[in-house]
Image (cartoon, helix red, strand yellow):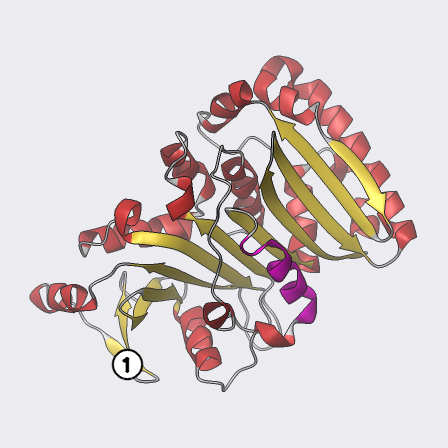
Amino acid sequence: MRMTRVTVVCVLGILIAAPAATGALPSDILYLLPRESGVVAFIDLLALRASPHYQLIKQHFLPPRIAQFDRFVRTMGIETDKDMDWLAWGLVPAGPEQPGELFLGLAQGQFKPERVEESFRQRKLSSDLFRGQTIFPMGSDVDANDLLFTFLDSSTIAFGTRAGLELLLETRYGTHESLLQNSLLLEHVQEANGRAPIWVALDEHYTRLAVRQLVPEAAKFPEFERITSRFRTSLLRLTVERELTLDFHAWCAEPADAQSISLLLQTGFVVQNWQSQKTNPPLSAVLGTATVRTAGERVEVQMEIDEKDLRALLEQPRPFL
């Protein structure tokens, strides 16, 4: 799963008339995430079911690996639309200790682990143990990108690629540092948690990828790589007041960096808006509301979404930014 797609579909999925009251990622669950997490994302399914756009949100917001998890657990008798309260997931970027990006996820709801275990027995499907946890594969478990899952308790499922899931379990048992030791990202997670039905916190690597996809015209300028190398973290969320407002905040190394990035983004939005006026009027209408401003080392992007443009955006067959 590429972060560029995750972020884009998050933007699209966020544009919904969600109830004011939202759930939160519990702290004991939050600290299961490893310190190296570059992305932490959350969607409150329980709150969003009240939205008339719920099914469209699922189609456009949930990244492919979550959709794969959704399809598989349905075969085990678990229904996302009624049994799950929230979904959260994270990405750990490739680094010296592992060659590829790691994916891991968590889901909370009303589950029956014994039903899943019985289904595996009846189908003669294999499972194995790690840290005392029964690990269930969703596929052949031959490819490093295949997903597996386990029940942490009767109301919590952990899932991911094998390396991602094992890292989550090592973090759970205290043999690996958790997000508690990642103060930069944790600060933004705590800022959004419980205050928005959908949010994503990103480190500097994934922030650059997100901005490249959110404002593709800005990424075409020669100075894009140099300027965006000054990103530190970012936070994407929806706030619901009298209007629907999409907020994207990115933190830079210095106030001067924020000024340069602000100018780059403003130019990119203008060009993208102009190009989409005839080909994608709903997108153009949303881009026309975009405001970009700075506050010290922070860049703030805000968009206001009109209900009439919302469904037109969500009904399109693929991400639009």
Measuring from the top left, give residue 256's x and y in whole percent. 92, 50
Q: Does the magenta portion include 191?
A: yes
Report helix, strand or loop for mark 1: strand
Asked if residue 130 is positioned above or below residue 101 in the image, the reply reads below
Q: Is residue 222 visible?
A: no
Spot the residue most to the top: 278
Query: Which residues make up the magenta segment?
Result: 183-194
Q: Is residue 35 left or right of residue 135?
A: right
Q: Quadrant of residue 241?
A: top right
Q: Is residue 165 left or right of residue 258?
A: left
Measuring from the top left, give residue 36's x and y in whole percent. 60, 71
Residue at x 37%, y 64% (from the top left corner)? 159
Measuring from the top left, give residue 69's x and y in whole percent. 33, 54
Residue at x 62%, y 47% (from the top left corner)? 236
Residue at x 51%, y 61% (from the top left corner)? 90
Q: Is residue 289 left or right of residue 295?
A: left
Residue type at mark 1: give it. Answer: Leu
Q: Is residue 249 visible?
A: yes
Locate the C terminus by quadrant.
top right
Spot the residue most to the bottom: 175
* Neighbour tally class for label 1: few under 14, some 14-19, many 20 plus, Cα within 10 Å: few
Q: Nearer the viewer, residue 287 or 29?
A: 29
Dominant secondary structure, magenta = helix
Q: Nearer the viewer, residue 68 or 172?
A: 172
Q: Does the magenta portion include 229?
A: no
Image mark count = 1
Q: Which residue is mark 1?
A: 129
Q: Quadrant of residue 272?
A: top right
